Amino acid sequence: MKTDELREKYLAFFESKGCVRQPSDVLVPTWDPSVLFTPAGMNQFKDHFLGKVKLDFTKATTCQKCLRTGDIDNVGRTAFHHTFFEMLGNFSFGDYFKREAIHWGWEFLTHKKWLGIDPSKLTVTVYKDDDEARKIWREEIGLPDHVISGMEEDENFWPASAPSLGPDGVCGPCSEIYFTLPDGSNVEIWNLVFTQFNRVGEPPNNLRPLPSQNIDTGMGLERTASVLQGVPTNYHIDILRPIVHAAADVVVQKYEYKSENGRRLRRITDHIRACTFAVHENVYPGANGAKYVIRRLIRRAVLDGHQMSMREPFVYKLVDAVADAMKSQYSELGETIPRVQDVIKSEEERFFATIDVGLDRISRLFDDMRLRESSMVDGGKAAELYTSFGVPPELLQQMAAEEGFSFDWASYQSSMQTHSEVSGGEQNKLFQTGPLETLKEVLRETPFVGYEKIEDLCVIKGIVAGDGSDSEDDGLLLGEIVVGSGQPLRVVLDHTPFYGESGGQVGDAGMIVGDGFEFTVTDTQKRAGLFVHHGVMKSGKMREGQTCTAKVDTDRRTALCRAHSATHILHHALQKFVGGHAQQQGSKVDADWLRFDFSHQKSLSDETLAQIQQDILQNIDADAPIGYQTVTLADARKAGAMMLFGEKYPDPVRMVSMGDFSKELCGGTHLTRTADVGAFELLAEESVSAGTRRIVALTGKKAKEYRDSTVHIVTQASGTLGCAATRLIERAGELMTDIRGIKKTLSSGKPAGHPAVFAGSSSAESIDFAVARAILRDTARILNVAYTDVATRLQSMLDERAKLLDEMSRMTAGGELSADDLMAAAETINGSRLIVAATPGANPNVMRGWIDQLRKSSDTPIAILLGAVQDDKVVLVGGLSHALVDKALSAGTWVGETAKLVGGGGGGRPDMAQAGGKDPEKLPAALEQAKAFMRAKLSAAF
Ligand code: ATP
Ligand code: MG
């Protein structure tokens, strides 16, 4: 049976039992802090199991995309593990229970109409104390005793070992179904979880029956397919084998099941499938969390390829094969192939650039360990390999394991403390508890009335102390609170006009006022359906149960609406001028300020930016109506609404449309007409990470302020440079060139004239905004500063130039002295020349230049020591011909001794040395001493 057929049969079977077919959840459930990736089908139903949401159905069936980081090391090692796999599940929320779950599972697996697996090939396990399950298997299904094994709580309880070790809360026994392979070994294909208890405290008698019992099941799609298709490993089933072969082609190897390369090819297959799905859902490789897992998987695949002689990116070439193999259930993969390839390829490029050095380091590390007979890889070394060569520690650990070395995670972690780059695989509490969760159990969710109303009469349902910053849901529930300490508080209402931060739009602020109190709301957050108003008491006493008026800060809300509506208009323009791939990666909508990240490889040209700005202004001018409708997801898709992969949309969903040019699924607040955006200004276009660009823009009031300040900054900056505004870019460029020239002159030691052309004289002309904006943007770009910093940057460049010119003028003064003058003053001792002189105004570069020149032009051995005063400090430079150095004389000692006399020190090589001192007034005497010192040396040397 084909895998696609198996998937469909499963869902159809459970539909026939009354389960409602639900879509898979996304791969990265951002709403669930306890996991990085969706690990199982039940994950999206956690709140259903706890009765914390309104149940539209009590039985469900799904095919869930899963990714288990815990199985990374099993990939390639076992025949039946993947990182990414599909789990088929059926779920009961207080509906059917143990009997039906067992009967239906068995019926689906063995009945001719469905899978028709030979029952003698199946064995089962139950939790040792679950007599009820054992009885059903034995008496109702008719299994002989010897195929039913009773297991301990660490194997057959969920969560594992919950009865003795906890956590408190819902839990229950499991029963698994195994298939017997031709070689007599077993593979688990199906797991039934019977959540029937609430654990309360320590054993014994700590398992209380739940009033509402649940069923959570999982069948591995690939495992069951491999059993049905009679292949020895999941990797040989119809949807995976083509990827294995594509991988073999790309790395130019023949695929052999049993060889080491066979194992590598299966690992590459697994990892590229996982990464294709993840990147498709906008999870890009990176340094933390889920992103880090994707980085690790790509790098592991690269390493496998490297060991098969690949020296440049190849993994990305398999994206096509994955999309093709998975197309029947996941046709959407076909829509993002180029983007996914680009992202994977650039991560490969980055790793290939360092991999050779990294591997070389690793083999040296292993050699060294063998030599020292140590068996544990040092964590500090591992940290260095990761930060400098990109070798993820888990990879190093795997390679070390192959050599029989262990890995020191503790020292790795401590070495990495400074980089917050730990993979974050740690599991948090499975189910949350706390004051807000308590409120949620009663209230389920807060109805939001803020689309229609900005102010409403509400009831206070809960007051929680603290702002929740220590842990997600801490603090105490308070009955009442009096103004006083100014402590942060959270308030939950029966319903609210305050928008809770979501979809990029920040939360509303405002006031909650009631009889005898005022509460200032500084922010509103959403916590799994509850709207939580953060803030402080302003006056009086507030009590739970009190009626109050919730008033949103209208000006701020309107500014938020302007920015949000403008974001949609911008998204539309990006699609139009950059392309369909320029999809939203992330966004933040604040008061008249927005940030929008989108997929694109290169920076946008000025032309494109101008087109985008133009298009946006046109759409604002057109004053198109903005409206919203609640529609089913299917209808939204039909209407062509923009949908983002990896985003979890409710069904039905809110669709916001503007005129007839934009339709987006969005829960945010919006204007009613596009003209109300008022003004729009693009502030910046920049890179966020590989393959992602960012646009920052302003709307309404802030855009107008920006317009005013732009003109002001340009006027100020051109005043600073004493030029017309239209010549600002040119003059800024000249200033940069000029400074570079002066620096060059100074270091060459040959003074040259530089006119004082940048003296400021203000030129008061009025310029129009469009011109000013272009001038400012280009000037900011050549100076490489933010637009707000242009004027200050120019001023500091002028200051720097003045200082350099000052140095140069001192050098010019000193420059009246020439090498010839110095030579004329030389005295001869024992056939050698000696020059000791003060060279006022010269800098060390010039002094060294003279020394070189003198050494070259002297036909006899020569010793030179020059002294100058620069910035109130003494500079001494000395040099000797090689003939003198050969006689064991040293410029270093000479200069060093002299420096002591001017309150300093220093030295250098025997042929050339430099030192400083802090007593300029002692320079003449010191030079006299220096002369005497060398006279004596020269007399003695020959
Ligand atoms: P195993 O012990 O074999 O790793 P598990 O006990 O972790 O399996 P469950 O958590 O019970 O598995 O998941 C339900 C079903 O999902 C399993 O019966 C199996 O068919 C499938 N499954 C679990 N992990 C994987 C994986 N890494 N790759 C493929 N299928 C898996
Ligand atoms: Mg497992």
Image (cartoon, rainbow, N blue to C red):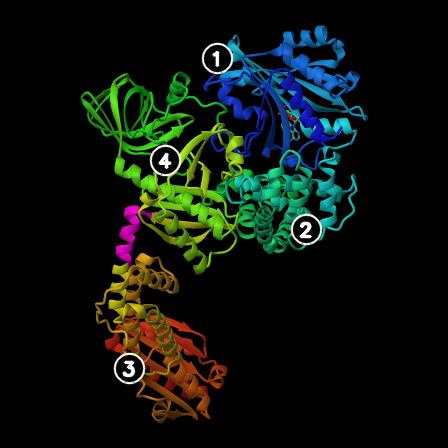
**One can see residue 207 in this view:** no
Mark 3 Cβ and ligand 1 under 8 Å apart: no
Crowd tier of the residue under label 3, counting other residues whose Cα lies within 10 Å: few below 14, some 14–19, many 20 or above: some
Mark 4 surroundings within 10 Å by alpha-carbon count, few (fewer than 14), some (14 through 19), many (20 or more): many
Q: Secondary structure at mark 2?
A: helix
Q: CA distance from mark 1 to mark 4?
A: 44 Å
Tag 2–tag 1 contact (CB < 8 Å): no
**Which residue position is annotated with label 1?**
200
* Along the line of sight, the residue nearer the viewer: 431 or 325: 325
Crowding near pointer 2: few (<14 within 10 Å), some, many (20+)? some
Is label 4 in a helix, a strand or a loop? loop
**What's under tag 2, amino acid-wise?**
His
Q: Which mark is residue 306?
A: 2
Span colored in magenta = 699-710
Label of residue 840 in the image: 3
Three-letter code for the amino acid on which mark 1 is drawn? Val
In this picture, is 137 found above or below 612?
above
Q: CA distance from mark 3 to mark 1?
A: 89 Å
**Nearer to us: label 1 or label 4:** 4
